[in-house]
């Protein structure tokens, strides 16, 4: 899976809104705090608003807020709102995917990839990010990555 810049920016923006604990932040504040290009952020916030993940407040004290409590919004929600399904194989559903011959078990690999992504992204909420405390499974997977002697660059 490739995490796009757009999804990365969306998650970072929502983390800032979660950390603000119900106080509206302007797009400029979010962009500055997370080093996100402002014009790009406006488009992302629009998509997140259409997905009912953030809401905007008008007026001199206005800005953007999470649409629901941070503990009820997962990273998966934000990524799906921006980029669609978490793991796609040629834009085909995985449940009925079949390959012949030596690749016959490959759909199970793709299903495992999707399940692993879901385990991490659907268990991690924006409240977790704002608190700086990740679920144990996520901490474990991050440690596994850091402990891997191969240290992947990509």
Image (spheres, rainbow, N blue to C red):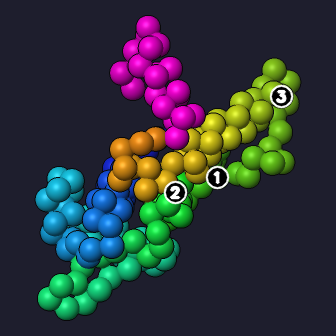
Residue occupied by mark 2: 74
Q: Is residue 138 one of those drawn in magenta?
A: yes
Label 2, secondary structure: give it.
loop
Q: Main secondary structure of the magenta part?
A: helix
98 or 110, which is in the foreground?
110
**Numbered range of the magenta stretch:** 135-154
Tell me the number on the disc at residue 91: 1
CA–CA distance in space, label 1 to label 2: 23 Å
**Whole-percent x and y of residue 146?**
41, 19
Residue 26 higher or lower than 105, as above or below: below
**Whole-percent x and y of residue 151?**
40, 15
Give the side of residue 134 with respect to residue 29, left or right.
right
Residue at the far top: name it. 149
Quadrant of the image for the C terminus? Answer: top left
Mark 1, residues whose alpha carbon is within 10 Å: few (<14), some, or many (≥20)? few
Give the side of residue 19 with respect to residue 71, left or right.
left
Residue occupied by mark 3: 104
Whether pointer 1 and pointer 3 mark residues with C-beta atoms closer than 8 Å, the reply is no
Quadrant of residue 62 within the rendered picture: bottom left
Label 3, secondary structure: give it.
loop
114 or 19, which is in the foreground?
19
Residue under the point 18% across and 85% down: 61
Label 1, secondary structure: give it.
loop
């Amino acid at each position: 899976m490739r995490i796009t810049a757009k999804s990365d920016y969306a998650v970072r923006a929502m983390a800032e809104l979660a950390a603000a604990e119900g106080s509206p932040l302007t797009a400029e504040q979010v962009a500055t705090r997370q080093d996100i290009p402002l014009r790009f952020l406006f488009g992302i916030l629009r998509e997140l608003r259409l997905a009912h993940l953030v809401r905007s407040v008008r007026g001199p004290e206005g800005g953007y807020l999470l649409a629901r409590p941070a503990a009820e919004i997962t990273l998966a929600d934000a990524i799906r709102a921006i980029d669609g399904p978490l793991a796609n194989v040629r834009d085909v559903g995985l449940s009925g995917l079949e390959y012949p011959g030596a690749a016959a078990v490959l759909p199970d690999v793709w299903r495992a990839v999707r399940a692993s992504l879901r385990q991490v992204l659907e268990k991690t909420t924006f409240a977790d990010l704002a608190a700086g405390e990740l679920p144990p499974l996520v901490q474990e997977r991050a440690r596994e990555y850091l402990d891997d002697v191969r240290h992947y660059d990509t």
